[in-house]
């Protein structure tokens, strides 16, 4: 099955990369990065089919169409920031990874602000009618 | 995005390590450094396009 192929690929790649721990650690790091990339490309097919399904669902939810776009963007941002942060951690630079993570959190927060404002406005409008 | 990329990088790494050791023990430190630099640049030219593809794919997949 697919998962076994991925598992074997990851483990053999890591074992190969371990050979360079003593002599040339940077090549082990390159191997780690390449393995991450390959596994991500494998998972991409599944992800694109998933996203197309969600787009179909989106047609039914006519109101929240734009917010679904926000959701996708947030997932994309978190994925990229997590990918880069873990690569930096692998290389041993935890501080850089922390900065990337903080920036990722902030950017998702900044992106979520308009959604929050929209919710508050809706509540205000409802409260206005009731009050 | 073939799996052979992993083995290509491993081969370059092993070659650079061996050549570096040979050059180091035969008294040519700077050549050993140049060899490792060449290996570094070669592997980077292989990896960078894939990283670029990754980020472009994420951009249009998640409509960022």
Image: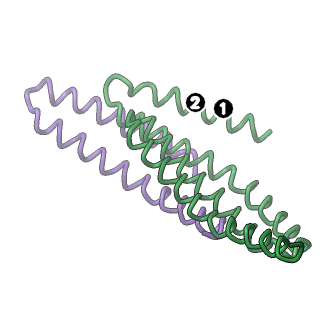
Chain colours: A green, B purple
**In the image, residue A27 lies at what x, y percent?**
38, 37
Is B49 placed left or right of A57 in the picture? left
**Residue A13 lies in quadrant:** top right
Badge 2: residue crowd in 10 Å (few <14, some 14–19, many ≥20): few
Q: Considering only vertical position in the picture, is A97 above or below B52?
A: above
Q: Considering only vertical position in the picture, is A131 above or below A1?
A: below
Which of the numbered marks, if any, corresponds to residue A8? Answer: 1
Secondary structure beneath dot 1 equals helix
- Looking at the rendering, in which quadrant would you find the N terminus of chain B? bottom right
Is A103 placed left or right of A7 in the picture? left
On the image, numbered disc 2 is attached to which residue? A12
Which of the numbered marks, if any, corresponds to residue B11? Answer: none
Q: Nearer the viewer, residue A98 or A54?
A: A98
Which residue occupies 39% across, 33% down? A92
- Do the residues indicated by labels 2 and 1 lie within the same chain of the protein? yes
**Residue at the outermost left position:** B27
Pointer 2 and pointer 1: residues touching (CB < 8 Å)? yes
Which residue occupies 64% across, 70% down? A114
């Amino acid at each position: 099955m697919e998962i076994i192929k991925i598992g074997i690929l990851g483990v053999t790649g890591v074992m190969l990369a371990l050979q360079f721990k003593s002599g040339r650690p940077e090549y082990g790091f390159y191997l780690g990065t390449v393995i991450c990339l390959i596994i991500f490309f494998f998972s991409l097919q599944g992800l694109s089919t998933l996203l197309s399904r969600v787009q179909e669902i989106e047609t039914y939810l006519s109101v929240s169409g734009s917010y679904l776009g926000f959701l996708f963007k947030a997932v994309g941002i978190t994925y990229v920031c997590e990918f880069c942060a873990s690569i930096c951690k692998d290389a041993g630079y935890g501080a850089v990874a922390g900065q990337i993570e903080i920036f990722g959190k902030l950017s998702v927060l900044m992106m979520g602000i308009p959604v929050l404002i929209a919710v508050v406005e809706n509540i205000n409008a409802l409260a206005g009618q009731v009050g | 995005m073939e799996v052979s990329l992993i083995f290509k990088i491993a081969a370059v790494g092993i070659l650079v390590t061996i050549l570096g050791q040979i050059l180091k023990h035969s008294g040519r430190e700077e050549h050993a450094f140049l060899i490792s630099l060449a290996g570094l640049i070669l592997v980077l030219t292989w990896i960078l396009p894939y990283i670029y593809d990754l980020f472009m794919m994420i951009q249009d997949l998640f409509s960022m």
